[in-house]
C-alpha cells in the first residue's frame, strides 16, 4: 500500500512540474518570425576574396603554400 502511495505521489509531482513548466514557457512563435531585410555578408566577402586572389600575381600564389621541410640525410652516422 505504501509503494502505491509513493508511486502516485511521484507521478502527481511529475505531472504538476511538467504542467507548471509548460505554462511558464514564453511563446516564441511571433518573436522568431524574423524579417527579410537581413544583410547576407557572406556573398560580398567571398567576392572580395576572389577578386583579391585574382589580382595577385601567379608567382605569389604558387609561393604562398608552405614548402615541405627539408629532411635530414638517411645515411647512418659513422662513429669514430
Image (cartoon, rainbow, N blue to C red):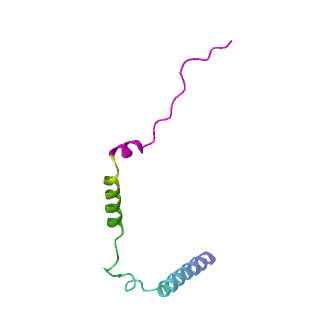
- Residue occupying the point 53% across, 84% down: 16
Task: Out of 19 and 2, give the one closest to the viewer.
Answer: 19
Horizontal and vertical percent position of residue 46: 34, 61
Please state the extent of the stretch shown in magenta in the rendering.
58-80
Vertically, is 29 above or below 51? below
The secondary structure that most of the magenta stretch takes on is loop
Q: Position of residue 51 (x, y in %)?
A: 31, 58
Instruction: Please tell me whether residue 44 is drawn above or below residue 54 in the rendered image.
Output: below
Give the residue drawn at x 32%, y 54%: 55
In the foreground, 65 or 17? 65
Relative to 49, say whether 61 is above or below.
Answer: above
Is 69 included in the stretch rendered in magenta?
yes
Magenta span includes 65: yes
* Residue 66 coordinates in the image, percent (x, y): 45, 42
Residue at position x 52%, y 86% from top?
Answer: 20
Q: Nearer the viewer, residue 10 or 79?
A: 79
Position of the C terminus by quadrant: top right
User: Could you say which is closer to the camera, residue 38 or residue 2?
Assistant: 38
Amino acid at each position: 500500500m505504501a509503494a502505491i502511495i509513493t508511486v502516485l505521489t511521484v507521478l502527481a509531482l511529475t505531472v504538476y512540474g511538467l504542467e507548471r513548466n509548460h505554462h511558464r514557457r514564453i511563446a516564441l512563435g511571433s518573436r522568431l518570425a524574423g524579417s527579410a531585410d537581413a544583410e547576407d555578408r557572406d556573398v560580398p566577402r567571398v567576392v572580395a576574396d576572389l577578386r583579391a586572389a585574382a589580382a595577385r600575381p601567379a608567382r605569389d600564389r604558387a609561393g604562398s603554400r608552405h614548402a615541405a621541410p627539408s629532411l635530414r640525410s638517411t645515411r647512418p652516422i659513422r662513429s669514430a
